[in-house]
Image: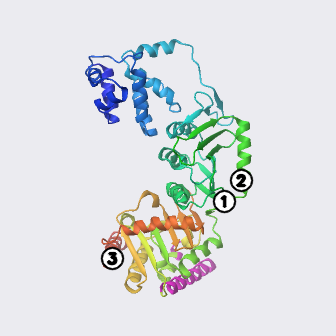
Amino acid sequence: MTDTTEKLKTVMDYFAISGNQLAKALDVDPSLVSRWLSGKRKLRVASAQMDALAEYILAQSRSIDDIKWLNAQFEAEGLPTDIASVHRTKQNLIMWLASDGEMLRRNLTNMPPIAPATTKNPRQNTPYPSGDSAVKLGTLEIALGLATMLEGLPQDSRADIFLSNDQIATIVQEDISGLIIRATEKSGLKIRLVVCISGNTQAMSRLIGTYMQPLISGHIRLSVVHGMTQAVTHQMHLIVPGNTVMLVTETPSVAAPPVAVIVADRSFAAETQKSFEQTARYAQPALQVYSDDYSRNILEILYMEFATPGSLDVVKDSVNPLYMTKEAYDQALLALGHEGAEFAWRSAEFARFKAGMDGVLGGDSVFREILSLSRLRQVARDGFCRMPGLYFMQKGFVNLNAEGCAAILDGYIRYLEIVPNFHLLILDDLSALHAGNCWHIKRNVSMAANCWNGEEPLMIHTNQIFIVHEFQGHFDSLWAQGTGSIGNRASVIAILRDVAALLTKNHLMK
C-alpha cells in the first residue's frame, strides 16, 4: 500500500468516516473508495474527486482541534501550515493525500512567492492577516483567525469585547471561548467585556457560565448596558487596542453561519477603540474588582456576608479561620508577628465578626460550606494552609501554621456538633474552577469570590441578581453531589477528626 493510502485511512479513522459514507458524500461507487484504500487506484491532484474529497473532510472538521490535528500531519510531512486560513488547509490536504502531491508542492515552491498582505503592529511586530480571505465564514474560520490574533499578543496584553446583544452565540461557542480563556490563563490577557443586555436571563446565564473562571480571576471585567431586545443582526467587536479589530455579525436566529472580518488597520482600530470607550463609560460594572490594597470596604463586605441575617453558601479551596476560637485566632496573630496595637485591633475585629456570625447562625439563617478532601489531606501532609492575608487583616498571603490549621478543624467539628444551622459537605476534590479561590454567596443578595491564583490575592463582589443566581445554581449543583454520600454530619465529623489526627501526628507531636 502507498503512503497516500495510509494517509486516507488515517484521516478516515480520525473523523470516523466509513467507506460507504465517503462514497455517498462524493457520489461515487463504494468500489472506487475500496480501490483507493487498497492502493489499486491512485488519488491524484487533478482527479475529479480530489477537490470534493478535501471539501468533505474539512466539513467534518468541526473544531479548531480538528484543524490542529490536520496541521500536525502536514507538519510531519514538511508542509508549511497556516491555521488562519481554511483555504490553505485545504491546499495542504490535497497535497498530503494525492499521490502526485509532492510534484504539486515542488511546482508551487518554484513559483514566485505571493505573500498575503499583512499589517504589523508597530510596537509588537506581530503580523495579522488583512488579505487571504479576510472575510471569515462560520465559527471554525472565525476561530482560526482569532487564534492568529491572540497568539501574537505579548504577555499581559489587553483587549476589549463589545456585544451588541447578550444573545450572540459566537462568544460562547466552544472554540471561540476556549481560545479567549486560554489566552487569559497562559498570557495573562485582560479583557473588558461590555454587553448590551436584553433581559434574556438564559443568554446571560450561558455567557457567565462559559466565562466563570476568568470572571472570578479578574481577567475579564464585565459591564452591562441596556440594549435593544430585537435587532436585524447581532454584532461582536473584539479590539486589540491600536492594532486589530475582529467584527462578527450573526443573524438573531443563528440559523446562518456567523460572518467575521479581521481589520488590521491602525486608524480603524483607533476609531473603534474610541467608540468602545464611550460605550464603556456609561456601562454599569457587573462585578466590582478589589486588588490586594487592604481596605475597610473589603472587610465590611465579609462582615455583611457572615454577620448579617441571611443564608450563606461558601465553596472554599482552603479552610475558614472564622471557625477558630478567639484564643486560637489570637495565637495565630502572634505567630504572624502582630503585636501591640496591631494585634489589639485585629483581635477586636475578629471578636466582632465571630459574635455577628454566631448571632446569625442562632437565628433562621442557614450556612452551607463545601471543602475539598484532597486539600484537607494536603494541609495535614504539609502542616500549613495557604490563604489570603485579608483573613488576618493584612496584605498578601498567609501560611497558617499547623496549630492554626488544627484549631480551624476543631472549630468545624464544634459547630457541626452544636449549631443545627451550620452544614458542611466534603467532596473528594473540587474542580479546577475552584482551585485557589473561595466563593461566598449571600442568598438572593450578593456574591463575592476571593481568588489567590495570581501573584496577589484578588476579590470580586457583585449584587447583580442575575450573576448571583448563576453562581447560586452552580453551588447548588455542587451541593447535590453530596446527597446521600459523605454530606451527612456524622461522616463529615469523622473525616475532619481523621484529618486533624493526621495533622497532629505529622506536625504537632514532633
Circle 1 Cα neighbour tier, 10 Å, few/some/many (<14 / 14–19 / ≥20):
some
Q: Position of residue 367 (x, y in %)?
A: 46, 78
* Side of 80 relative to 506 (left or right): right
Amino acid type at image mark 1: His
The C terminus, quarter of image: bottom left
Amino acid type at image mark 3: Asn
Q: Specify start and end residues of the magenta stretch as a single range.
A: 333-361
Return the residue at label 2.
279
- Mark 2 vs mark 3, foreground winner is 2
Residue 93's place in the image compared with 476, above or below, is above
Identify the element where label 3 is drawn. loop
- Mark with earlier residue (2, 1): 1
Return the residue at label 1.
226
- Mark with earlier residue (1, 3): 1
Whole-angstrom CA distance, mark 2 to mark 1, is 11 Å
Q: Position of residue 358 (x, y in %)?
A: 50, 85
